[in-house]
Amino acid sequence: MKLVEMDALSLSKEISNREISSYNAVKTYIDHLKTINPVLNCLVENRFEAAIEEARKADYTLTTEEPRGRLFGVPISVKECFHVENMTTTGGLSYRAGSREQKDAEVIRRLRAEGAIILGKTNTPALCFCQETDNKHYGRTNNPWDITRTAGGSSGGEGSLIAAGGAAVGIGADIGGSIRFPAHFNGVVGFKSGNRQVSQEGNFPYVDKPEQERMLGIGAMSKSVQDARLINQIIANEQPPNRSLSDFKIVYPLPHHRFPINRETYQLITSIRDTFDGELAEEQANPPFFNEAALMWQQMMSIDGGADMAKLMVDHDRASPFGEFMKEKFFRNSDVHPYLSWALIGARLFKPTQKQINQIHVALKRGDDILEDYLDDRILIMPVYHSPAPVHGQLYQELFSIRKTFLNYMPNVAYANVWGLPSLVVPVGMSRDGLPIGVQLVSRVGNEEALFQFGEQLEKRVGGYNRCTAHDEAVEQAEAELV
């Protein structure tokens, strides 16, 4: 196995056992990133020199009695939204490029405490407010399997980078599919933590609306389920109980004309059901409150009409999403990407009334109580999206259309956000066009270990991560030079 195909847990063990040095691992990944990044534009800021120095220190530590963490000497990547000391957090906005952060985000602090070595930060859409990764400051990230297609978002840089083997593991955040879209489109494992299970301290933009905070999850984008579990163990505030997968019923989705799914995705879900036939209890149903999920997500994301985001959009107090959108449409001279300005126009247009907000609060209280019981012993299998990765721009059109087509395409992803549920995406196959397809496993907070157990079974018996090798001409040469 090539070094760039190894997951973080395996690489950490080899480094600790002195089968490979941290320096060689970090240098190999840096050389690989220099090869793939000009095509993919996934890494937007690097700290290569610092990473090399940290790797040398890690190798020296092996000669001492100093304790070693679970990610000892392992090169990782992080989503641009997380503060890293002495690096920028721009949110894809040029006016923020001049200042460097003085303190690591809490999740970064925890990862570094376990010995992780950060290679750099990965691309996002502006303010992470879109499911396609493109912004005016850093530009567009491409899907490694087909560069004419989207990497998804907002953790699209992470998804693209991990798919091409640019780091051992990465970290993302998800408030509307931002981990799960890229995991599905790029063919990597992705885990969104449940309601307030991971600290968002040092995340930009900080989410301070309670209705939105419950939807935010932070977790790994990885090459294996075991890495997703490991990262969650490191960054989560509480550790879930170790419940057995045999205690759970697997719930397969019911087809519905309102919520389209392409034939290949449906066939893969059917094949999963056939694979586990008779081994685990099962049923076919759409879970409670599924039909309402997309609309509730849209209302909760628009709870303040996008006012807070609009203030962050520019470096002055005359923020006008409509004005920025029109400047870009007619003159191409706005510093704000139209994906962001259009999304904020929509948030203003569809801002819920106080009556609707009250109805949301009542629905959330009722739904939380019902789902706590319903999901106590159930794992939902759900598609992530109705198709593999679309061409650039199509996902944005489908999710931000004035015709509200998001009501058809968002429920599967929005469900875990609205109800604050942990969700694990596992690659399970490829389309006839050579594009990855993943499925998500969803349950309630406290059942994370069962999700990881089932995910590992899917890896072994159905699919799992396969690195995209289309852009790594120099990998073999770089590894040979390090031997």
Image (cartoon, rainbow, N blue to C red):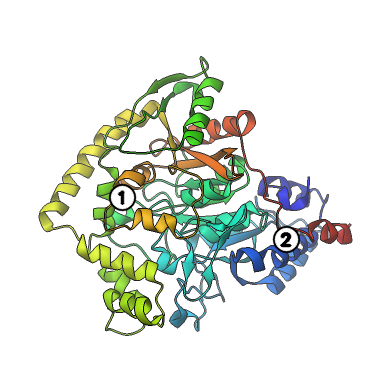
Q: Position of residue 195 (x, y in %)?
A: 36, 48
Whether 317 is drawn above or below 384: the answer is below
Residue at mark 2 = 29
Mark 1 and mark 2 lie on one chain; the one further toward the N terminus is: 2
Q: Assign a secondary structure to mark 1.
A: loop
Residue at (65, 65) in percent of width and height: 39
Q: Amino acid at mark 1?
A: Thr
* Apparent side of residue 466 relative to residue 107 in the rendered image (left or right): right
Residue 37 visible to an observer of this rendering: yes
* Apparent side of residue 78 relative to residue 376 in the rendered image (left or right): right
Q: Position of residue 296 (x, y in %)?
A: 25, 48
Q: Assign a secondary structure to mark 2.
A: helix
Residue at (25, 48) in percent of width and height: 295
Picture quadrant of residue 157: bottom right
Residue 405 marker: 1
Whether 292 is drawn above or below 399: the answer is above
Whether 35 is drawn above or below 259: the answer is below
Q: Are marks 1 and 2 in contact (CB under 8 Å)?
A: no
Residue at (47, 43) in percent of width and height: 387
Q: Amino acid at mark 2?
A: Tyr
Front residue of 420/348: it is 348
Residue 376 marker: none
Give the CA separation, mark 1 to mark 2: 40 Å
Quadrant for the C terminus, please: bottom right
